[in-house]
Image (cartoon, rainbow, N blue to C red):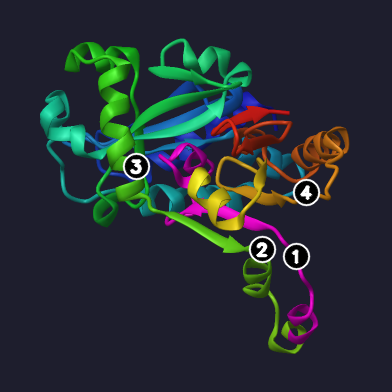
Amino acid sequence: MTYQKFKDDLIQDLTPSFPDGSVFSLGRYIKNNDRVLDGLTLHIPDSNVSPTLYLDPFYEQLKSGKQYDDILSEILKSYRNNMIPDVRDFDFFNEFDLVSGRIIYRIVNLLKNKKMLKNICHIPYLDLAIIFCYLMDEKEYGLATIKITNEITEIWDVDTKTLMEHAVKNTPALLPPVIRPISDVISDFLSPEHLGLLKDVDINMYVLTNSAFCGGASCIIYKDLIKDFAKDIGYDILIIPSSLDEVLLLPITEDQDIPFETVREMIAEVNRECVSLENILSDHPYVYRRSEDRIICV
């Protein structure tokens, strides 16, 4: 089955499962790291909530041998799980004062997101970019966000400085940081009989994320977070960007000679083999220098 026929068949087969007048539309969407995906959006009469599913992964499943009917059922289930039964009035979104308390920031790779950042309000930071999002009400929508585009800032009549002022306060409050020894994280996945094997292993590394475990790499720019952690540990900190969702923190002791080239090669290999394209933050590490009170690229 060709990709075009796959998309056409999905629209034809999905439509009868939704209210009369429902329409599916196809669009090309630029995701993180400039990955372009085909999105199938469901428009239901009298509803301003239009869930979108990205079809590329489903077509890959089809090519790998998964049955079309099974994929159709999975897509149908996903749409139903993402539908919100009550129509929500989003007129409030046009008033900055009504949304300013839920403006947050996230960090993405600057060079890998050239296309996306053309229309996204952002601030360069090292070789990264700070972007801004509106965090939806978790009780109703889970951890859903709306990226703040240039068009939205024109409606609000605000600039990036104003967005940053609010995001600096909101992000740590809405998504508090979580720092755990990596041994504790590993133990969460071990059976009781294997926990004893880990007890005597000293791994001086920590995982930094946020309370939602999503977009947690942004915690590195929380005010004084890395500074205070380095002060408590007593060393400079090697920051390994494992994904957009978390980073690894490794104290650099005085007797350590960090082979940065080896670390870069390791990060690049992990990104190629283990991290989805959309979830890659960077291909190299960073270091927090206590003497300079700043994070640098290495």
- Toward the bottom, the furthest residue is 193
Q: Does the magenta stretch include residue 197?
A: yes
Callout 2 amino acid? Ile
Q: Nearer the viewer, residue 244 or 25?
A: 244
Q: Is residue 153 above or below residue 49?
A: above
Secondary structure beneath dot 2 equals helix
Q: Residues within 10 Å of mark 2 (few under 14, many from 20)?
A: some
Q: Name the residue under label 1.
A: 203
> Contact (CB < 8 A) between labels 4 and 1?
no
Q: Are marks 1 and 3 in contact (CB under 8 Å)?
A: no
Label 2 and label 3: CA atoms lie apart by 24 Å
Q: Relative to 73, say whether 264 is above or below.
A: above
Secondary element at tag 4: loop
Q: Residue at x 66, y 74 (%)?
A: 187
Report the Cα–Cα distance between label 2 and label 4: 21 Å
Which SS class for mark 1?
loop
Which residue is depicted at the point 49% across and 29% down? 39
Give how far across and how far down residue 74 sits, in percent.
53, 53
| Mark closest to the chain's N terminus, 2 or 4 | 2
Residue 221 on image: x %, y %: 47, 36
Q: Give the range drawn in magenta.
A: 196-225
- Whole-percent x and y of residue 81? 38, 54
| Cβ atoms under marks 2 and 1 closer than 8 Å | yes
Q: Which amino acid does label 3 sit on?
A: Thr
Read off the residue under disc 4: 254
Q: Name the residue under label 2.
A: 182
- In terms of image quadrants, where is residue 113? top right
Q: Quadrant of the C terminus?
A: top right
Please name the residue that numbered disc 3 is placed on: 171
Closer to the chain start, of discs 4 and 1, is 1
Please report whichever mark, 2 or 3, sits nearer to the chain's N-terminal start: 3
